[in-house]
Image (cartoon, helix red, strand yellow):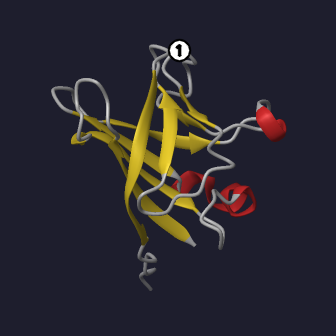
């Protein structure tokens, strides 16, 4: 089942309490343990979207992709523009982390900086009703 996962910036030197003004909304399938489900992702990849929100910058929108390579034979990345590779953001071992409220995950931005985020919310995505 697709979930909407909200990540907020975790504690940093500049934000000792973290900040909900920097983060991501990720729509992705999670397995029963709360990990990204690569099997379900294969059949729903077009629905696995990401919105990056960053104070002072326009929102960026992209896709959650799962290309070969990395630990365990694949890695999870955010692809903002399919025609460019220099804008992609890689998750740090996202395939092994759980996405439960209070958990922490890290994402390396396009500039190469690794930022840690706290899972602020996880909720099921309402199914889209088809019109007849």
Q: Position of residue 11 (x, y in %)?
A: 32, 36
In the image, farthest residue toward the right: 73
Residue found 51% across the figure and 43% down from its top: 105
> Residue at coordinates 24% horizontally, 34% vertically from top-left?
16
Q: Is residue 108 left or right of residue 92?
A: left
Dot 1, crowdedness within 10 Å: few (<14), some or many (≥20)? few
Q: Nearer the viewer, residue 82 or 59?
A: 59
- Residue 72 screen position, x and y as percent: 82, 40
Q: Which residue is at the front of the view, 19 or 87?
A: 19
Q: How many marks?
A: 1
The residue that appears at 43% across and 81% down in the rendered structure is 129
**Label 1, on which residue?**
86
Mark 1 lies on a secondary structure that is: loop
For residue 124, what is the image quadrant? Answer: bottom left
Pick the quarter of the image with the C terminus.
bottom left
| Residue 52, placed above or below residue 122 | above
Q: Farthest residue to the left: give it.
A: 56
Front residue (pair 127, 4)? 4
Q: Quadrant of the N terminus?
A: bottom right
Q: Is residue 47 above or below residue 122?
A: above
Point out residue 26 in the picture as x, y percentages from the top left corner: 44, 51
Furthest toward the bottom, the residue is 132
Snapshot quadrant of residue 102: bottom left
């Amino acid at each position: 089942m697709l979930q909407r996962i909200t990540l907020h910036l975790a504690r940093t030197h500049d934000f000792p309490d973290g900040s909900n003004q920097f983060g991501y909304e990720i729509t992705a399938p999670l397995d029963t343990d709360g990990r990204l489900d690569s099997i379900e992702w294969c059949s729903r990849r077009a629905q696995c979207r990401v919105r990056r929100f960053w104070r002072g910058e326009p929102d960026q929108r992209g896709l959650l992709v799962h290309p070969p390579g990395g630990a365990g034979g694949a890695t999870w990345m955010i692809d903002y523009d399919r025609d460019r590779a220099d804008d992609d953001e890689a998750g740090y071992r996202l395939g092994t982390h759980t996405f439960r409220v209070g958990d922490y995950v890290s994402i390396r931005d396009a500039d190469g900086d690794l930022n840690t985020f706290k899972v602020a919310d996880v909720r099921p995505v309402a199914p889209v009703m088809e019109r007849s």
